Amino acid sequence: MKATRILMDMPITVDIVDKTATAKMTDAIFNYFKYIDEKFSPFKPTSELSQINTGRIDKHQWSRDMQMVFKLSLQTKRETNGYFDIRHNDKYNPSGLVKGWAIYNAANLLKKQGVKNFFIDAGGDIQVAGKNHEEKKWRVGIRNPFNRNENIKIIFISHEGVATSGTYIRGQHIYNPHEPHKKINDIVSLTVIAPNIYEADRFVTAAFAMGKKGIEFISELKGFEGYMIDCKGIATFTSGFNKYVKPD
């Protein structure tokens, strides 16, 4: 059971391999992402986040999910020495964490229903479980930032999360909180493999903000691997990355 819909201004694909898969399962996942968009979109004036940014909602009125995301964002800020910060230009934007958190929660919705083999891809951030339709590990491509029609690496995963940050599609949308007016030009792409997509997404955002130092930060995180491409097209990767390049 595989389906793709455009939500949160990006394609979201849900692929459930189990024979128990139903359209109701995929619909529930897409409805969850729709809920996330309505709550956390910085672009929709009716979202809870937008109402917080315009002062229409006080802190004591925040929803439980909003409180959780702000708590996790503060935790991530501490764990990354301030390289992750959702406050910029007097506005809050937790997008660097929300997508991975939402994918992680969506994956748990499937697991609670007993689903063991699935793939969720939201705008290139991916969580997998089990095996694909060929009963093999899931294949995930890392795009060439200088030629988006080409994959420069294929990795094979069975339960991890994969997130990529880069400037080759959306331009300079990531900023270094320590030097907010300085563009990040020394790297163009950073992919992180982590125990789950929530961890991958939040730490890849912070690591990219660090520039070339980001790959060193990822290498020090237990259970994490990374693949960085600099502005000259030179790749640097962590010591354990190559174990994911082998299909077995």
Image (cartoon, rainbow, N blue to C red):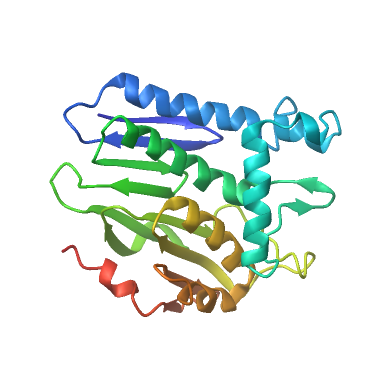
Residue 167 visible in the displayed image: no
- Residue 208: percent from the left, percent from the top? 58, 66
State whether residue 64 is above or below residue 86: above
Q: Farthest residue to the top: give it.
A: 24
Q: Residue furthest left?
A: 134
Is 184 left, or right, of 57 in this rendering? left
Instruction: Check the image and report above or below for 123 versus 196.
Output: above
Q: Where, quadrant-wise, is the C terminus in this rendering?
A: bottom left
Q: Is residue 111 visible?
A: yes
Residue 138: x %, y % from top left: 25, 51
Quadrant of the rendering where the N terminus is positioned: top left
Between 70 and 206, the one lying in front of the other is 70
* Front residue (pair 178, 115): 115
Q: Residue shown at 45%/37% (left/top)?
A: 11
Image position of 131 (left or right of 213) = left
Say which quarter of the image contains residue 2.
Answer: top left
* Image label count: 0
Between 49 and 174, the one lying in front of the other is 49
Q: In screen coordinates, is 188 left or right of 193?
A: right
Residue drawn at (74%, 64%) of the image: 177
Residue 45 position by quadrant? top right
Task: Answer above or below: position of 67 versus 212.
Answer: above
Answer left or right for 131 relative to 186: left
Q: Quadrant of residue 166?
A: bottom right
What is the x, y in percent for residue 142?
38, 60
Taking the spot 34% from the left edge, 60% from the top edge, the residue there is 151
Residue 35 percent across, percent down from the top left: 56, 27
